[in-house]
Amino acid sequence: CAMFSHTTQDCFVDPWLLSGDPGDFHDGFSQIGLNEIKVRRPQNAFLLFSNVRRKQLQSLYPTLTGSRMAQVLGAEWKALPAASKDVFVNQAKEQREEFLHEHPDYHFVRGPNKKRRQSKPRNYPNGRNFRP
């Protein structure tokens, strides 16, 4: 707060930031800035599956890297029978319905993506599009 003012009485700090591990706090929101709050979208069926299965795989194979873990999870999800997937699909549907009920005016806006911005052709004064 010293950056913003010379007195600490003007400073506001969220209490949960001071109460231990910030990873313990999750209420469906993520903090962007001082006054902005971004609503987290509900998880899809694969993310629900991967959260459960990732914990199991980490306990079985503690040396597995993150990229290899993602490959294994993707392969397992692809090979999973439809009946087993339905459990996660139904959970995802329930979360989505609850989310839409809690946030009826929510509209997803895709954030800036560096790769997408760079892949667009550039317009040069001579009228040609050129990609280096």
Image (tube, rainbow, N blue to C red):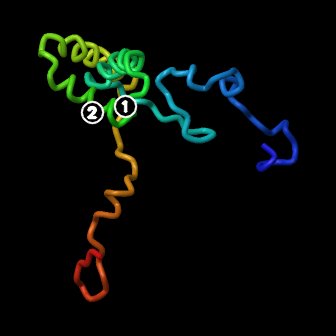
Between the C-alphas of marks 2 and 1, the distance is 36 Å
Q: Nearer the viewer, residue 117 or 67?
A: 67
Q: Residue 132 carries which label?
A: none
Residue 128 quadrant: bottom left
Horizontal and vertical percent for residue 19? 69, 21
**Which residue is at the far right?**
7
Asked whether, in this view, residue 99 is left or right of residue 83, the answer is: right
**Amino acid at dot 1:** Asp
The C terminus - image quarter: bottom left
Q: Does residue 59 appear left or right of residue 82 in this picture?
A: right
Nearest to N terminus: mark 2 or mark 1: 2
- Where, by quadrant of the figure, is residue 59 drawn? top left
- Residue at 29%, 19% (x, y): give it: 49
Q: Position of residue 99 (x, y in %)?
A: 36, 21
Q: Mark 2 or mark 1: which is in front?
A: 2
Where is 31 relative to 122, above or below? above
Which quarter of the picture shows residue 123?
A: bottom left
Q: Nearer the viewer, residue 16 or 51?
A: 51
Element carrying mark 1: loop
**Residue at image point 35% right, 25% down:** 42
15 relative to 35, above or below: above
Q: Residue 15: horizontal and vertical position, in percent?
A: 70, 24
Badge 2 is on which residue?
71
Residue 131: x and y in percent read 27, 74
Instruction: Characterize the local packing of mark 2: few (<14), some (14-19) or many (20 or more) Cα atoms within 10 angstroms.
Output: few
The amino acid sitting under disc 2 is Gln
Question: Are the residues at dot 2 and dot 1 in contact (C-beta closer than 8 Å)?
Answer: no
The residue identified by callout 1 is 105
SS at badge 2: helix
Quick check: 109 above or below 56? below
Residue at 26%, 25% (x, y): give it: 46
Q: Callout 1: few (<14), some (14-19), or many (20+) C-alpha neighbours within 10 Å? A: few
